[in-house]
Image (tube, rainbow, N blue to C red):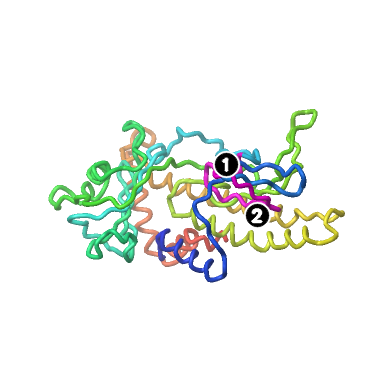
Amino acid sequence: MIAIPQHVTEQIIGKAAQERGVRISRPHKVVSVQPDPENANSSNVTFDDGHVLCARIVVGADGSRSTVRTSAKVGWADPDGEGNGGRNSILLQMIIADVTLDNPPPWPKDQINLAVNDNMFLFVALPGQPYPNISGDDIVYRMACGIPASLGEPPHAPDTEYVQKAFDAWGPNVVLGPGAPRIVVKQTAWSSRFVTRSSIADTFFAHLPTGTDATGNLVRGGGPVVLLGDAAHIHPPIGGQGMNLGIRDAVKLAPALAEYLRATSDAAFGGSRDVDAPLRRWAEERRGRALTVIRMVKQLTGLLTLPNQQRWVLGIIPFNPIWLRDTFLAFMCKFTWWRARGAWQISGLGNP
């Protein structure tokens, strides 16, 4: 299995877009999406600089706090009705950081390393030189770990001291034991925090509301809106599924979008044809795919956050859930078909 860092993927996609004549303009923040009062089939997209763009269709790929989704009044909730106090609360809030180190751990630099104890600590060396301001002699490592609620909310951009405490509490400095040299965080190139939860939009396709009927239900008489990526679905980062799922949303949307635009450009538009059909089919398929990923990630998260404590069966037989998990996985990973099955699922090839 090959893991490619997100910044490398973004560079590859950005270069491919430019080579095809696609202009990417940043930063432009959407503050509202409203029906065009002069054309029921269009929408007015307003940006924070006051510019208004009239669009035949709006593709909302603006993240979990999507303004497009809010403007379209599309519901947003955990598909299983779980709140923020679930069984995997250790991972409800996490930090992520790209750092350089003194005394880096003797772990393979071409693998994703995962330390699981009372927390989960991910550690991987990033290829190449992702940050121009960092010496080429320094390897940049990415770390991520949960922050227990008892420690309060982590800072928006954790500094080197905060990241060091995570290394000391749950990372290599714990796993390698007291005899190993202490790993010191030398520089933090970038860091952030995020809340991990699972949510999905009620629908990935809708028309903008233009009012309500006599019973209080929304009347969707405005222009069409589609949602993809984090605007349509979010889940914990276990398995690295989020960005890949969003990219697949976009790839699958392209032919449906082209079919819709061709149909609405036809002189017969406004007749009896169901021009929304390709977008509805896309939305139904992608929502099903997203639900599959969310449930898989929940299972992986539950597996990784089992309690490291002795329990009893029938009050007389002791067992440790982590020992059972590790023993089972060590045995099953001896089989090629099991390893291939895991790679197939995590890669997304089994859920295109």
Q: Position of residue 207 (x, y in %)?
A: 71, 45
Q: Which mark is residue 55?
A: none
Q: Is residue 169 above or below residue 188?
A: above
Residue furthest to the top: 215
Q: Position of residue 119 (x, y in %)?
A: 33, 43
Kind of element beneath mark 1: strand
Magenta-drawn segment: 48-70
Residue beneath the point at 14% across and 52% down: 181
Residue furthest to the bottom: 19
Compare marks 1 and 2 and give the one earlier in the sequence.
1
Q: Is residue 281 magenta?
A: no
Neighbor class of circle 1 (other Cα within 10 Å; few <14, some 14-19, many 20+) is some
- Are dots 1 and 2 in contact, CB under 8 Å? no
The residue under label 2 is 285
Q: Position of residue 40 (x, y in %)?
A: 77, 46
Q: Is residue 61 magenta?
A: yes
Tell me the kind of residue under disc 1: Val
Q: From mark 1 to mark 2, how far is it between C-alphas?
A: 29 Å
Q: Nearer the viewer, residue 181 or 32?
A: 32
Q: Which mark is residue 31?
A: 1
Q: Quadrant of residue 250?
A: bottom right
